[in-house]
Image (spheres, helix red, strand yellow):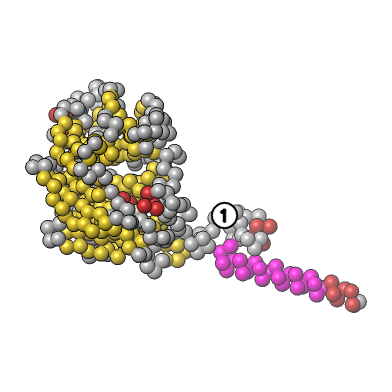
Amino acid sequence: MSQKLKIILIVVLVLGALLIGVYFYNKSRGVGTDPNATVYQKFNPFGTSTKVPVTTKVDPNTGEQIIDDTGIKQTEIIKLHKLTDFAVAGATYFEETKPIIASTETVIPTTADVVKNNPIKNDILGNVKPSFELIPSLRYVEKSTGHIYQMTINTKSAGKISNSTVPSVNEVIFDGKADSLIYRYVSFDNTSITSFITSIKNKTGFFLSSDITNISLSPDKNAYFTIIKNTNGVNGFINYFDNTKSSKVFTSPFSEWSSQWSTLNTIFLTTKPSYLVEGSIFSLNTKTNTLSKIFGEVYGLTTLANNDGTKILFGASLEKGPKLNTFDIKNHTSTDLDTYGLPEKCVWSINNIYVYCAVPNTVIGTQYPDSWYQGLISFDDRFIKINTVTKEVTTLTNSSSSNVNIDGTNLFLDKNESNLFFINKKDGTLWSLDL
């Protein structure tokens, strides 16, 4: 046998051995073993077009599953939902009352029905059925146009319910029924804030005072508290969405206040914050119109009272950034929650024990909350749940791990505390997080 034939034979044998080796290696891995695959596919080292399950591992800190090749937590991708493609000026949760159609007629719920919480009525066949159902929903306003939208939470289906145009809306405040709302926007001459209240159902409206510096909702969302600047300082008024009455409950020579109407008879007033200024928080008794100091001398103080007015979540500007704390009003004690963040990026749970917060993964600088308000600093947040009694912190999701950049603000919950809603400060879009 010639030398040339020997070389050819050796090459053929080596190639054959390689192909056989690749085949059995892939077979041992379960790749390329699809009985319906072509010969080429079976020998292809990348397998067939059939999707192969991705190898996963578990984060030892959270117990969540992590995809090996990207490091993205699968549960985080599912939890976060972008609800709008446009910036919103405000949003609210409510339950839409939807009549249930009987076999012969539609039963329209009355005010008495709602008060009695969905009473039972008999249909024509004698079956016992409720007259209406409550659909968990959202209403929100497009920032650029003022158009109002409604979304069914379970299906994420949405539609426009009002196309009345109010350009460049900065803030929107809804009442408890999500029917009446207050538009807040810069006046055409750029000298003041215009406030306009209207009703979706009645399509009526009127302008409020042009000197309103702050508005907060009552706990039942049937009324609102306004702080109005005058030559001597400010006055505070309680007003009702139905425009039935208005009463002055507060007067101060100091004009820079932020308010929160926490309980029926208590409005909390906090001096407007700066990292350069020591702030204080006061409680206003709406029955006696008396003002009482709770605590103060805190730089960069911002606050968020819980739903029964017993605790204050507050932020303090420290050397390493803004720190979250709680203050127990009855015992006059404060607790460091060992977490950096801002109360404006939090919401209290229904039981007044937990707070849900969007907190920064990285804190840059120390000039808070000024730099965040001014847009000089933007966060990439993780969402957490803090037990204010035990100080235990649970991470719900991390926007950075999900390849989305979220700086969460304006947080609110649904009735069952199964969804957390918020606005992404980076672009104004509305989002939800499954809890």
In depth, the one of 30 and 273 nearer the eye is: 273
- Residue 24 appearing in the image: yes
Query: Which quarter of the image is occupied by the N terminus?
Result: bottom right
Image position of 221 with respect to 19: above or below: above
Residue to which mark 1 is pinned: 50
Where residue 427 appears, as percent x and y from the top left, is 44, 44
What is the quadrant of residue 207 in the picture? top left
In screen coordinates, is 372 left or right of 11? left
Seen at 44% across and 51% down, the residue is 376
Helix, strand or loop at disc 1?
Answer: loop
- Residue 80 appearing in the image: no
Q: Is residue 23 magenta?
A: yes
Seen at 33% across and 46% down, the residue is 410
In screen coordinates, is 133 left or right of 159? left
Segment tinted magenta in the rendering: 9-31
Where residue 285 appears, as percent x and y from the top left, is 12, 45
Residue extending farthest to the left is 288
In screen coordinates, is 44 left or right of 308? right
What kind of secondary structure does the magenta stretch mostly adopt? helix
Residue extending farthest to the right is 2
Q: Give the number of callouts.
A: 1
Q: Is residue 284 magenta?
A: no
Seen at 17% across and 59% down, the residue is 328
Kind of residue indicated by mark 1: Thr
Seen at 60% across and 54% down, the residue is 49
